[in-house]
Each structure stands twice: as structure tokens, then as C-alpha cells.
Amino acid sequence: MVTLEEAKRAFIPKLRPLRWDRERHVLTILDQTLLPFEVYWVEAKDPSQIAEAIKSMRVRGAPAIGIAAAYGMVTALNSPTNDIKESLNALAKAKLQLDAARPTAVNLSWATSRMLSKANRLVHEGEAKKVDELKELLEEEANRVYEEELEAELKIGIYGFEKLNDGDVVLTQCNAGGLATGTGLGTALAPVKLARALGVNVSVVAPETRPWLQGSRLTAYELMTDGVPVTLISDTAVGLVLYKKMVNSVMVGADRILADGHVFNKVGTFKEAVIAHELGVPFYALAPTSTLDLRSSVEEVKIEERSPDEVRTVRGVPVAPEGVKVYNPVFDVTPPKYVTAIITEAGIIYPPFEKNVRKIANM
């Protein structure tokens, strides 16, 4: 088994979509809505700007959203005040603002809750008596969120690497690489990138992922940048690709995984899982343990819906009759019966998920 130190030495990230400016307390975000045609960075100086970047999908992917939200909480203290209680109120307000940006991604509320709890503890225990002290300590906490995410992805890559052989082809969905996690590595793509870094010949098949085309715009761009062979297909070709045994496994990310093994991920994931299950192809969901939701039932999770114009158009160009009725869910839900295993930084979770997810979550 590859060690964590070996993985750290082997993988050098080329794409980091989030950059924190410590001097100015500004988060610089790579605008993923413009990729791969334009590389443009956006500066976010307060929680409202970071919330807008999350909502507009300039920054996207559950882990990256969590990291951005953590730094977003730090920017809540950029306002000129010396009142520590006012600062705590500003943080509470920022949490509400950020959480509303993308309600399905559990990493978002997880990160803001962590930051707000840390702030309250620092103030109430007397470790932060001044606003500047609080800001500095919260910045350190946001940095830890990033570092923990990167280490988690390296560990996910190590566990996922166990499921790969030389010459394997992996089918993925959407973009669960470093653009989606903020680190340059990723979750679903971590085993592939690590394998390539270690000299193992693996490649990827990426569906285009309508309507935002994260597969064609982002996954293809990211993998080509990292030197990983990738074949782009239309979303409707997934069944044929699996039927013709053109891939050896399916590896997808997740925005939320419930205690019973239900996987919420980019719409289209459920289709891949069902077809893979029927054809005997292993289906893996790869995500950090921060994505595990041990409280919600499948009926309680809100599936985000977005503007109908995203389906009626492709990058602003109409492709459907004006005014046609549209259903545009961002995520779907894959029942546990179709999931071969869930791969986390704490280990690989096999069925029965209702028993084993909680074991990993509590480690």
C-alpha cells in the first residue's frame, strides 16, 4: 500500500482554483464558469461576494465550496469594528448568507458551523479578546480546513488506488477533481492522478454533464492539464460505453452521503450506477468524511433546482423552443444497492452501509 508520504512526494498539483491572500484577507477564485476558454480570477472580499461565487458556480464542488466558505467566514471580520460581540454577530450573519448559496452541499454548512463554533469558543474562553486576534485564529482554522482536505484527498487517492490496475479505464461523472475540491487533486479523480504520478497507466472516460458541461469543460481540461488521457463522451453514450466494456470501474464524487449509503451527486450519477450494477461493473463513490450526513433521511434532503434557461440554452445559445417547460435538478440520489463501496480518507466502506458508514464516521 502506498504511504501518505509517498503520495505527497509523487503528486504535485498544477491547478489550484482557490488562493488566499493573507495580507489583504481576500479569497481569489478561479472562475470555473469561463473554463476552458478563459482563465479569469475573481477577488472576493466579504461573505456576500463569496456566497455569490458559490451560487453562480464560479466555485463549485462540495469540498471547494467548504474551503471557500471557511475563508468566507474570515472575510466577515474585514469590516472595521473593534467590538468582539459585533464580530460574532457578523459571523452568525455570514453563516446564514453562505449556507443559503448551495443548500445540498453538506460541506458548506459543515465548514461554516465549524468556523462559527470555533469563534464562539475562542471568545468565550478568552483566547481571542480582540477582533484582530479572532481574525488571525479563524484564518488559521480556515487554513486547517484546506490542509485537512488535501490530506483527506491524498488518503482517498491511496485507498482508491487499490481498486485500479495498470491499463484500467475509469468512468466518472461531472467534475470531482482538484477544481471541485480546491486543492488540485480531487476525490473521484484522486486515485487516477495518484496512479499516473506513480507510473501506472490509467485513463478516464468523462461524460459531458449537461447542462453546465462540467465534464467537457472542466474534467477534460483538468485531466489534460495533468497529463491524464481522457475521452469525452455525450451523456447519452454512458450505457453503450458500459455495455461495450470500455471501462473497468465507475468512480464518482459526492455532495452528500447518508448513513444508510444513499449517495447524492451530480445528476446523471444514478443512471451510471444502475447500468454499472446491471453489467457487473464496480461503482465507487469517493468523498471525505465531512460529506457524510448521519442525521438526514433521504426524504429530508433538498435537491437543488436551477434556472430553466440552463437547459433551454448552451452557454447562452438557445437549443429549445422559447418558454418550454423545464425540470432542472442539479443532483440525483443513488440508492445503496447500486453502490459497490464508499471510499473515504478513513477507509473503504462496504455494505451493509447502515452499519459501516457510522463506524467510519466515528473513527
Image: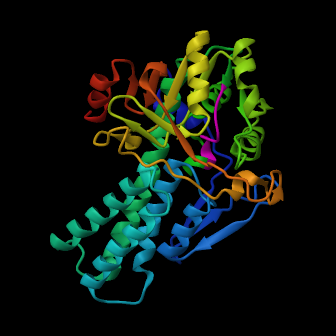
Q: Is residue 272 above or below residue 212?
A: above
Residues rendered magenta in the picture: 171-179
Colour scheme: rainbow
- Is 186 displayed left or right of 352 in the figure? right
Visible residue check, residue 332 = yes
Q: Position of residue 70 (x, y in %)?
A: 43, 62
Residue reaching furthest left? 125
Q: Nearer the viewer, residue 211 or 52?
A: 211
Q: Is residue 76 above or below residue 337?
A: below
- Judge whether residue 73 is colored magenta: no
Q: Position of residue 142 (x, y in %)?
A: 41, 61
Q: Is residue 238 above or below residue 131?
A: above
Q: Quadrant of residue 310?
A: bottom right
Question: Residue at horizontal 61%, vertical 19%?
Answer: 275
Q: Position of residue 8 (x, y in %)?
A: 54, 37
Q: Quadrant of residue 204?
A: top right
